[in-house]
Amino acid sequence: PGLRADAASFRALEHSEMHVVLIEFRVSTPYPIQLANALGRLCQVTLMLPESTSSPARGLDAKNVDLQPFRLPRLRDPANLATIRDLRHRLIVEHPDLVHITCWHMWGTPGLGLCSSFPQVSTVHDVSRHPGDGWSYPSYLYPLQWRWANQVIVHADVARNELVTTRGLDQHRVHVIPIGAYDYYGAWARSDRAERPNCVLFFGRIWAYKGLEVLIEAEPLISREVPDVCIIIAGYGESIETYRQAMVNPERFEVHNYRIPDEKVAELFQSASLVVLPYVEASQSGVVSVAYAFGKPVVATRVGGIPDVVDHGQTGYLVPPRDAYSLAEA
């Protein structure tokens, strides 16, 4: 705890005999892969991912990281019990010094935490459920994320404050570590792909807290000053038809309403002039991390931990939430 990530610290940890097992339950994310690659420079790392994870080998440092896929059934399938038994057996065989669950699972996190003989770190991406999020776990399950963890990692000060003041965790158990740039997607970038002029990208899951309706409301104001603006909406979640009805100039929008594959992520961010996050509520955002990896400025709202990672006037602009005029001006 408190170790500074400077060159001297990394030199002190080089060639460590520590063995860390990272376990991730999401099927599409660069987060555990980039973390495994970084840890692989310092110690022995085993990364356990669902078999259906998209393109893990493309960005994984196979020389320093041992990849172990596992079967992850549908959430309501009792076969999850067999998966937990398999993972617990693997941990006994691996006998790591530390187990780090990089994103929780309703079955997996309790199954690995109960009666565990290994120290456990848990990364908590969201302390509470976002308003309007129709796919995440019910709010009463969220404490499962940190129930058995010896140490907890969050990505923003607001999340740490909520865990300490509202959830009652010891402040010495909770550590704030920003996500960092998602350069994972650079593996799909192409040198011959040019940026499209006046192209604004809204990327990620489409739920009420993302504020897409504010961006749609701002479009006529933007178009008045930038007649050839193109606003790309790329992601899935709520039906996009509800939002289409509010579009004054639908020809200004380009919609990709599906789960975006990794190669398409690179194409969208390379093409964008800037990335917009009109969120009305947030904890943190991986979208900013992808934007930075591609060198794109952001326009975002002052909610949650987003102001922690946007240097106003340097890496982007921050505006009040639910303010279409300020969003358009930025």
Image (spheres, rainbow, N blue to C red):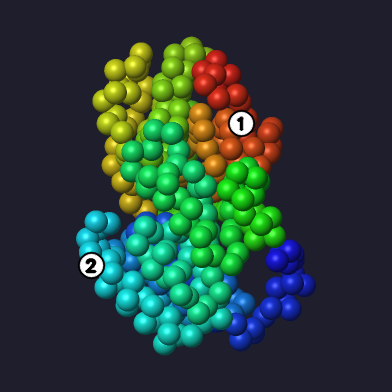
Instruction: Note whether 126 is above or below 110 in the view shown.
Output: above
Q: Residue at x 73, y 78 (%)?
A: 12
Which element carries disc 1, helix, strand or loop? loop
Which element carries disc 2, helix, strand or loop? loop
* Quadrant of the rendering where the N terminus is positioned: bottom right
Towards the viewer: 149 or 54: 149
Disc 1 packing (10 Å; few <14; some 14–19; many ≥20): many
Instruction: Note whether 225 is above or below 13 in the view shown.
Output: above
The total number of labels drawn is 2
Where in the figure is residue 50, as x and y percent of width and height?
A: 33, 66
Q: Which residue is mark 2?
A: 79
Q: Which mark is residue 232?
A: none
Where in the figure is residue 98, as x and y percent of width and height?
A: 55, 76
Where in the figure is residue 266, as x and y percent of width and height?
A: 42, 49
Q: Which residue is mark 1?
A: 302
Q: CA distance from mark 1 to mark 2?
A: 42 Å
Q: Nearest to the eye among marks 1 and 2: give it.
A: 2
Where in the figure is residue 15, as x and y percent of width and height?
A: 64, 84
Name the amino acid type tagged 1: Arg
* Quadrant of the rendering where the C terminus is positioned: top right
Left or right: where 33 falls relative to 133: right
Left or right: where 43 falls relative to 273: right
- The answer, for residue 191, to whether it is visible in the render is no
Q: Residue at x 60, y 24 (%)?
A: 320
- The answer, for residue 29, to whether it is visible in the render is yes
Q: Residue at x 45, y 24 (%)?
A: 215
Towards the viewer: 305 or 173: 173
**First of labels 1, 2 by sequence position:** 2
Name the amino acid type tagged 2: Ala
